Amino acid sequence: MNSPQRARVVMPVRWSDIDLFGHVNNAAFLRFLDDARFTAFPSMGVDAAGRITDRVLVVVKHEIDYQAAIPFTADPVAVEVWVTRIGSSSVDLGYEVSSTGGDRTYLVARSRMVQVNQGTGRSQPFDDAERAEFEQYLGEVPALRGW
């Protein structure tokens, strides 16, 4: 498979992301992943007017390899997100958080999301338009270190 088309989102490191060790806290990385995912796929769970729809994506699993600490810096970070698998109602995403120049990788991760109908609380299959949006970012599963 060719390398994926990745959505790339550049975001600042906020003072509130920093912990007592002087680097980005591990939980703040999850915000980076969330923000990148919502930027890459803005129509998932939201209609054209910006209202939340009855179909939303919920996280059911994260797997994260922290590869390097990010000290407090004025330099932003780049978060790349892509799709690694499309199921009937679930989608797996790959992520890489790096310096904007790409010379340092801080984190590699993957997530599984399930589309849920808010009215029933049950999974709901993707329609053709949702599937097509994911397919344009389809790529390989990120290589994560084993336990």
Image (tube, rainbow, N blue to C red):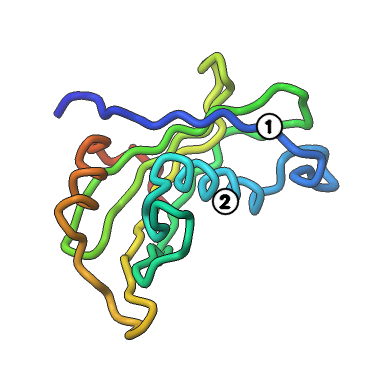
Q: Which one is earlier in the sequence, the residue at label 2 or at label 1?
A: 1
**Amino acid type, residue under disc 1 in the picture:** Pro
Quadrant for residue 124, please give it. bottom left
Taking 73 as reference, is 12 left or right?
Answer: left
Q: Which residue is mark 2?
A: 30
The N terminus appears in which quarter of the rendering?
A: top left
**Amino acid type, residue under disc 2 in the picture:** Leu
Quadrant for residue 127, please give it. bottom left
Q: Which residue is mark 1?
A: 12
How many marks on residues?
A: 2
Measured along the vertical axis of the image, is residue 45 above or below residue 7?
below
Quadrant for residue 12, please give it. top right
Secondary structure beneath disc 2?
Answer: helix
Secondary structure beneath disc 1?
Answer: loop
Q: Give 5 or 117, whichever is nearer the viewer.
A: 117
Disc number at residue 116?
none
Q: CA distance from mark 2 to mark 1?
A: 14 Å
| Contact, mark 2 vs mark 1 (Cβ under 8 Å) | no
Q: Give 124 or 53, whichever is nearer the viewer.
A: 53
Residue 90: x and y, percent?
26, 61
Q: Give 52 or 80, whichever is nearer the viewer.
A: 52
Which residue is farthest bottom? 120
Residue 7: x and y, percent?
39, 32
Residue depicted at 32% across the width and 65% down the height: 114
